[in-house]
Image (tube, rainbow, N blue to C red):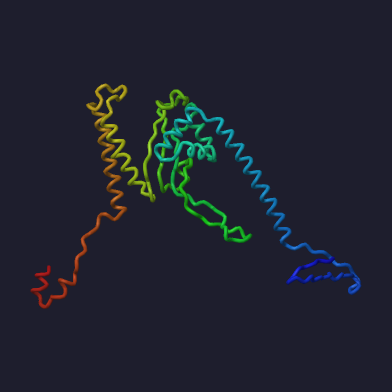
Amino acid sequence: TESKYHRHGENLKTRSTELGSAVTGSSLTTVLPASTTVKKSTVLSSESRKELAKQAKVTKEERRAQIDGRHRYLISRLADGIDLSEQQVEETIISDDKFQLIEQFFAPSGLKKLLFFYQDVLQQKLNASSRSDGSTNSLPQKKLFIAMGSTEDFTGTCAFFLRTSDEVITASNVSQEVNFGMFDCTNGNILQGLEFFLSQIMIPALKSQQNWGAVKEGLKNSQIQEFLYSVDKFVGTLSSSRQNIEDKIQLTKVDIDIYVRNLQNPSDYITAG
């Protein structure tokens, strides 16, 4: 094999040395470098990722085709409450692993609640400065996702939908059969968020309620008055619990040195007492 190089206007020729088996009397064995195996694995991994991405895209489009007036109602409420565009909310919903919970919520006698959390979530991102070791950086990023409510840490905003009956949810009755609400628990302050939601939103709404269904007397009914009193009392308990947890109740610190420094005889002790 002959290769030519051009350096400072001069042609340099190098000729490779032919290696034979005359020295050892045996043929040379070719050994593939480890990098070849790594490259092969990388190619296979890349192909697997492409296939997964392709399947995910197909699933998203199938879910997008299922979206109707019921989903649009949920999307519009979430977009207004969390200050995201409807397109962003839609993309989030159809990409969520718990998308089937929405259908279970719409079904007759289905789920009583549908929860969405909007909070910082650690996103695994490939470190651009890293080599082939696959090291990653965990970066907090705001994310909207469907939640079970019992298996996820709650540190942000909760948006919830509640059913008012066991009837099937349709595009025509979704606005009457489904209630929407939110409460903020930023930094994990769940008690404070629940207290604010009840005291500033729910209780004023209940006290201004005119139609109480079969109870014709409305707010004059003793059972309704007792119910509202119980809710007020519950909010007071939440407030006390929150303040205790936040160390808002503290004993006054006394500077003992002021009294002890001047104690000289028994009468000083009596005065200090």
Please report the residue visible at 62 percent of the width from the left and 43 percent of the height from the top.
Answer: 53
Camera-side residue of 183 and 112: 183
| Circle count | 0
Q: Position of residue 246 (x, y in %)?
A: 31, 54
Relative height, residue 138 to residue 196 (above, below): below
Relative height, residue 85 to residue 254 (above, below): above
Q: Position of residue 128 (x, y in %)?
A: 57, 58
Relative height, residue 169 to residue 230 (above, below): above
Please report the residue visible at 12 percent of the width from the left and 69 percent of the height from the top.
Answer: 272
Residue 272 vs residue 66: left or right? left
Residue 81 vs residue 251: left or right? right
Q: Position of residue 9 (x, y in %)?
A: 75, 70
Please report the residue visible at 38 percent of the width from the left and 39 percent of the height from the top.
Answer: 182
Camera-side residue of 19 and 53: 19
Camera-side residue of 190 and 78: 78
Residue 1 vs residue 215: left or right? right
Residue 134, picture quadrant: bottom right
